[in-house]
Image: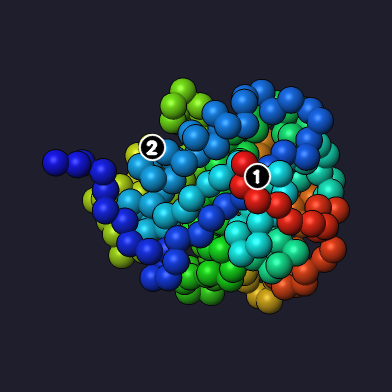
Amino acid sequence: MSTKPILGAFNQGGKPTIACFNRATTPLGVDLNVLINAMQVYVDNYVAPIWGTPARLVHSQSFIPGAWAMVFLDKADAPGALAYHDLTPEGLPQSKVFVKTTLDNGDLVSVSASHELVEMLVDPAINMMTTGPDPNIVYAYESADPVEALSFEVNRIPMSDFVYPSYFEAFHKPGSVRFDQMDKVRQPFEILKGGYQLIFKNGEWSQVFAAADSEKEQLFGKEDRRGHRSEQRKKRRLEPSEESTGYATAS
């Protein structure tokens, strides 16, 4: 008898295909096919059983009609950004991973890619928000940001930790349920060292960090988070992409 988890259709609809292709000249630090295979296991065995978000990742040469996308580029098109997700030329979810920028920052491409993958799957339209412990604050549904400094291995490839739906449910008592994949978060809306949370308060988006995490706050202040909800996402504006020409089939 198979022990593979039975998964529902994504968001009660179809199962998206995600076209993964490389436009970077900087080495990824891992073979792209190996990375795609590891991310597929990450989705199948870890993300989808928790969030109900199955997906099929394929190696392609460019965008595929009707498919979501993950594209690897050399340098950030927003200063300081390591990766973010927005929309394909067709208006479907897309993750961008900036290889040289990520590596120059001392981070791993696999962690940046899986970070964006889980956040794209959980909130593909970049519009999910929730109330929380403070009734005057709305919290963005970012599934990797609060734990973004943590990773675990899948097929010997580091993948980003991510929070569970329970993380956004303030009625849970500390330690009563599991709040993230690595079981490091102890209560709803907790931000671990090296992580952050996007919030909407008094008509503006801003960020909050773990208590006494001045290092993360200083690093964040140097980054342009245009791809995050506080900037490009909030504006809901589709800008032309340098990767917006042509479609391809999976290879």
Task: Verify CB contact (< 8 Å) between mark 1 and mark 2.
Answer: no
Residue 41 placement (x, y as % from top left): 42, 38
Q: Quadrant of the N terminus?
A: top left
Q: Nearer the viewer, residue 3 or 238?
A: 3
Question: Residue 236: x, y in percent?
Answer: 72, 73
For the residue pair 35 and 105, the one nearer the viewer reads as 35
Return the mark for residue 182.
2
Numbered badge on residue 60 = 1
Mark 1 falls on what kind of element? loop
Residue at the image position 66 percent from the left and 75 percent from the top: 202
Q: Position of residue 17 (x, y in %)?
A: 53, 55
User: Which comes before the other along the chain, label 1 or label 2?
Assistant: 1
- Compare residues 222 and 246 and report the one nearer the observer: 246
Residue 217 in which image quadrant: top right
- Residue type pointed to by label 2: Met
Q: Is residue 193 visible?
A: no
Q: Mark 1: which amino acid? A: Ser
Crowding at dot 2, Cα within 10 Å, few <14 / some 14-19 / many 20+, comes out as: some
Answer with the quarter of the image where residue 173 lies: bottom left
The Cα atoms of the two marked residues, 1 and 2, are separated by 31 Å
